[in-house]
Amino acid sequence: MTRIAFIGLGNMGGPMAANLVKAGHAVTGYDLSHDMLKAAEAAGIKAANVLTEALAEAEVVVTMLPKGQHVLTVWTDILRSVPKGTLLIDSSTIDVDSARKAHVMAAEAGCLSLDAPVSGGTGGAAAGTLTFMAGGSPESFAAAQPLLEVMGRKIVHCGDAGAGQAAKICNNMILGISMIGVCEAFVLGEKLGLSHQALFDVASTSSGQCWSINTYCPVPGPVPTSPANNDYKPGFSAALMLKDLRLSQEAALSSGASTPLGAEAAQLFGLFEKLGNGGRDFSAIIEMFREAN
């Protein structure tokens, strides 16, 4: 049994922490939302009223927060309270520079650290089937791996500090671009008189196949578990996709990489959000292309 403090118990963090409890670990959680704390308690997580209460006796601290600035602020507070040797794992999706700064802060405090963002959405968080992309020292990765394996199915050590965030940003840029391509193809197919099932049967088994078609098809019918069959209730919201695409463009600018399709995808999801769709699943962007026609 490991004593774990889990900071950030939202749609992703809450189920992840609950899986740690199911595996026999002692988890104390903290979140600014009272509703999130109540839900966490119902899942067997001990709720803390203040951050320092969650950190008391913690051997490992996991954070799942919205932005890099939040991670740096919270880690500053955490590192004032935990002893040397404590392992800090950040599973937020943030910019690479902030992730690297967090690693430096942890090293200066004598703590182990890992940036370990996730892929798999809320369904993967609940089922314990997430993919973790980890960045940090081999020692930190070895210490974190048994806990990550409780929450995920695929655990990849991508390299040194910040490498996990780099991998996440690149992966989600691919996802945003591919979903736009898939949506455009289905809208074109509709105009040409193709049924959704016919296009799916061809594309999902030939050169057009990708996760955005085979697993997350943006039209109702072909993939019964996709959000398109549930009025685009988000497994991964358009607002989160936009966040990740903007992170990819910040990284492209700072590194000098040319990502014209990533830039276009960011603009299109930015427009989709401005039209009031940020809380819908990102695959619902197909409706924007239909309306444009």
Image (cartoon, rainbow, N blue to C red):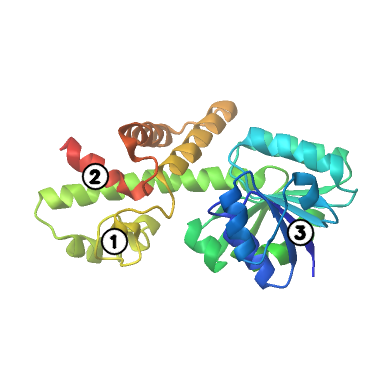
Q: What element carries label 1?
A: helix
Tag of residue 4: 3
- Distance Cα–Cα, label 3 vs label 2: 43 Å
Across and down, in percent, residue 267 comes to 37, 31
Circle 1 residue:
229
Tell me if mark 3 has few (under 14), some (14-19) or many (20+) residues whose alpha carbon lies within 10 angstroms of its own. Answer: many
Q: What element carries label 3?
A: strand
Q: Which residue lies furthest to the left in this view?
A: 193
Residue under the image location 38 percent in, 32 percent down: 270
Residue under the image location 44 percent in, 46 percent down: 174
- Relative to 192, residue 125 above or below: below
Q: What element carries label 2?
A: helix
- Relative to 257, residue 224 above or below: below
- Distance Cα–Cα, label 1 vs label 3: 37 Å
Across and down, in percent, residue 204 comes to 30, 63
Q: In this view, does 215 lie to the left or right of 287?
A: right
Tag of residue 287: 2
Q: In this view, does 26 lie to the left or right of 191?
A: right
Tell me if mark 1 has few (under 14), some (14-19) or many (20+) residues whose alpha carbon lies within 10 angstroms of its own. Answer: some
Tell me, yes or no, if residue 207 can be seen here: no
The quarter in which the C terminus is drawn is: top left
Across and down, in percent, residue 232 comes to 32, 53
Across and down, in percent, residue 47 comes to 70, 56
Tell me, yes or no, if residue 71 can be seen here: yes
Q: Do the residues labelled 1 and 2 touch (CB within 8 Å)?
A: no
